[in-house]
Amino acid sequence: MATVELLFSALPEHVRTARLVAAAVARRAGVDEAVLDELRLAVGEACSRAVNLHVGHGVTDPVRVTLIEDEKKFSIEVADDAPRPPAAELAATRGAAGASGTSTPLPDDAGDTGEDDMGLAVISGLVDDVEVTATGSGGLIRMSWPTMPTSVLS
Amino acid sequence: MDLSLSTETVGDRTVVKVGGEIDVYTAPKLREQLVELVNDGSYHLVVDMEGVDFLDSTGLGVLVGGLKRVRAHEGSLRLVCNQERILKIFRITGLTKVFPIHTSVQDAVQATD
């Protein structure tokens, strides 16, 4: 098991760095090349959401991304420290779960909750194994992908 | 990679050629461009996404915002995209039903509803 942890200030310009690091570590861990684009997008969505939550709540702590390499799967956890009522998070998760149909709410470009819902919708549409949880003091998005057998070099 | 934007007028359509990555950092630049075009009276837009390497939900939000703006003036916003990885994002969010998506700029410029 190998873990890479990334902490970055909640600024939009660092989200790209998080995407690149996550994709590089995932490739090294043996995640199928065919899903790396989706992984990159899912991590970007989770990090964008965390950045927006930190900015919106005036949280100065960094966003935390943890990349966990297990024997048969590769997991990514994106954690934020933005306070919110747990009930709101559960409602958002339910909204994302039904996103594959036509009922997806349209995002707005005004930065309202529509964009947040759309981010979760994209994640749930891309990742089979995803878990969104929250407490009063922060939230966590946990996603995982299967890995191929490791090469002789690793 | 940053975002690149250029515009070109073809008949009554304005083609916005977008290149690079549209994400939470760069999407505001695209939003500004679309708002500026609508404010200047360009209500029939074609957004050429062939040079886009990455698109996330923030970018989708900006495109929907652009669509709302041109529709307020009875205009249109058409997309040009052939890249499967970008098209997939429109599909999983149900936005293929919202945007007319064309395979070429020429096709989009000539299209009528």
Image: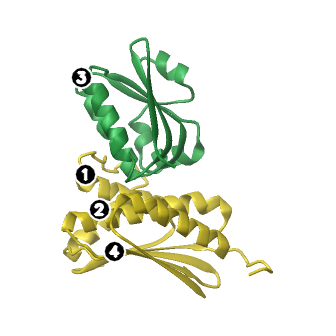
Q: How far, Cα to Cα, is label 3 from label 2?
A: 31 Å
Which element type, helix, strand or loop, lies under badge 1?
loop
User: In the rendered structure, the residue with mark 4 lies on which chain?
Assistant: A
Q: Indicate which label's residue lies in the foreground, 1 or 4.
A: 4
Residue occupied by mark 2? A52
- The chain that appears yellow in the image is A
Residue B30 position in % (x across, y down): 37, 39
Judge if badges 3 and 4 mark residues of a common chain: no
Q: Quadrant of residue B32?
A: top left
Residue B86 position in % (x across, y down): 53, 45
Q: How far, Cα to Cα, is label 2 from label 1?
A: 9 Å
Residue A80 position in % (x across, y down): 32, 74
List the single residue furthest toward the right.
A152
Q: How far, Cα to Cα, is label 3 from label 4?
A: 42 Å
Residue occupied by mark 4? A62
Which element type, helix, strand or loop, lies under badge 2?
helix
- The chain that appears green in the image is B
Give the quarter of the figure containing the N terminus of chain A: bottom right
Could you tell which of marks 2 and 1 lies nearer the N-terminus?
2
